[in-house]
Amino acid sequence: MSSEVKEKLIPILLSSVLLLVSYIIQINTSFPLWVYFLIYLIPFLIVGFDVIKESIEKLFRGDFLDEDFLMSIATITAMLIGFLPNSEPMFPEAVFVMLFFKVGELFEEIAEGKSEKSINELLKLRPDIANLAVGDEVKKVNPEEVKIGDYVFVYPGEKVPLDGVIVEGSSTYNSAALTGESVPVSLEEGDTVLAGYINLSGVVKFKVSKEFGESSYSKIIRLVKEASDNKSKSEKFITKFSKVYTPLVVILAIVISFVPPFLQGDFLAYFPEWLVRGLTFLVVSCPCALVISVPLAFFGGIGALSKQGILVKGSSYIEDVCNVKNIVFDKTGTLTKGTFEVSVIHPNDMSETELLHLSAHVERFSKHPIAVSLKQAYPHEDDGCEVSIIEDMAGYGIIANVSGKVVAVGNHKLMEKLGVSHKDCPHSGTIVHVAINNKYAGHIVVSDVLKDDSITTITKLEEHGLKSVMLTGDHKEVAESISDELGIKEYYYDLLPEDKLSKLDEIKNVTSQSTMFVGDGINDAPVIAKADVGVAMGAVGQDAAIEIADVVLMDDKPSKILNLINGSKKIVKIAYQNIILAIVIKILVLILASLGYAPMWLAIFADVGVTVIAVLNSMRTLKL
């Protein structure tokens, strides 16, 4: 529980206890009216002081017609109405109304998430050093000190600090943090390397082409800031309602109190009676059922969704989810597992097991993601084979001696370098070619695999009338294969973060419909921030993406999107049931109160009774 929530909870609990004590004193004693007023004034001010203070401050600013002002004037009126002739005291009701209002505010405080940490999380992830070449020496400096045209070294395991062009060496890079591409990319002299890439193997020297502030990584941070600033949040219904309702009931209460006695000819004689009616009108008008039941419906629903592993960062996002018509998915880590697995084995003149066995042994000492997947597919390292590395060629592959056989495992460039004729494969993924004693032995396809529920999710979304779109940093072949398997008709590939953001804007502009984006990595953070509803896959997602998202799926199952949509629709339905119930009954009782036909018990029912009914209805959201 945050310190802010605790600060609001303490006066609520204290006021509740004092209210109970005050009521016990009232029913067991016969003190003068002003004594009970002072007794109830204590819990009233404890729980309502900040609301009254805020109303007074807004009154002086000229912007006071909101729910705070209405709550203040209604509860203060209830505290004072008992001093008028022929009027019953309403001290407990006044404290209850203010207490319920503060409980509603507390629910909102708990339900709403904060995204201020997102920028800090992004900044923590940025490259912090650059190995600057100064003559014959290498000096570690802050990337911001490096200029265009300088030369920088990147060693295995390090993050590329700036954008540039490779001038010496070749290596394989994990680009997932920037592009979201699942397959590591191999780059050599003349290729462009981007800030945020992680060097997996080989020492590389590159010439800086962009200063740190203009690097790809810095652009992501800037895009997140801009997207966060431009994202407007819809006003809550209660605030909108109060802007019309509050001035209306205040004006009507004044009219009821002053106009009828003036028209009856004897203003002083009839004014007390009509003043009581006007004040009763204000008490009845207090929107207690709304300020409690509506936030409670959302808060209860948010709690129920959290038990399903769906974290919604505020009630406004529940309404936004209900309006979504397009759902845009990142591929890697969202629809796919984001981990490599052996999917296809095509041997020549040997068994699949033997080809996999030799390949895994060659990759025994490598930590490359492709090597890890081969070793996981054939984990029997202790089968007696003797393995010695002959050559580890960064960007090409590895050549090793496995029990007397010279086995080369790598990409097509390695086969071409060895002069070995190789075969292409129609399957998508990373193709690992194998040659034994300089003779082609076959190939193994390693690919990212779909999550178990991805196909079902896309199918059911289509049945719900929702359009699915896939964005990915992967190449065309991989994107086509995955989209065909999923049944997604619209997909875009080879996208950098700024491309994804542009594509999202294009989709929103073309369809003019609310759009949800679902992603997981830092590369997705700008798009998550810009979408009408941004969803992050929580368990494997980058912290920055989780912080910036409106909704977080903690177990990374795409099917939770269906739970989110169905649950949100039920929550909103219940909330609007409460709104209609409260407004209809309020209007009826307000009419009766203005005509003098509403006794105090009916006024209390219109306030507390309707509130209880609405709260009980809201509790249905606790089980979605």
Image: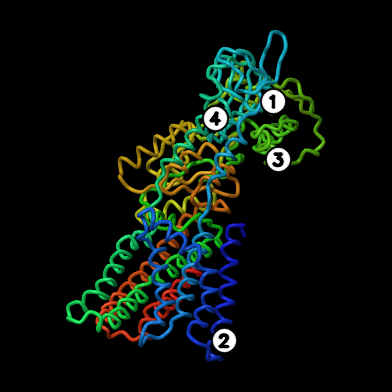
Name the residue type under label 4. Tyr
The residue closer to the viewer here, 243 or 167, is 243
> Of marks 4 and 1, which one's residue comes earlier in the chain?
1
What distance separates the C-alpha of mark 3 from that of mark 1?
26 Å
Disc 4 residue crowd, few under 14, some 14–19, many 20+, Cα 10 Å: many
Horizontally, residue 525 falls left or right of residue 406, namely: left
Residue highlighted by disc 2: 25
Horizontally, residue 298 falls left or right of residue 12, namely: left
Tell me the element at label 2.
helix
Name the residue type under label 1. Pro
User: In the rendered picture of this protein, how many numbered marks are placed on residues?
Assistant: 4
What distance separates the C-alpha of mark 2 from that of mark 1?
77 Å
Name the residue type under label 3. Tyr
In the rendered image, the residue lying farthest to the top is: 135
Residue highlighted by disc 4: 217
> Of marks 3 and 4, which one's residue comes earlier in the chain?
4
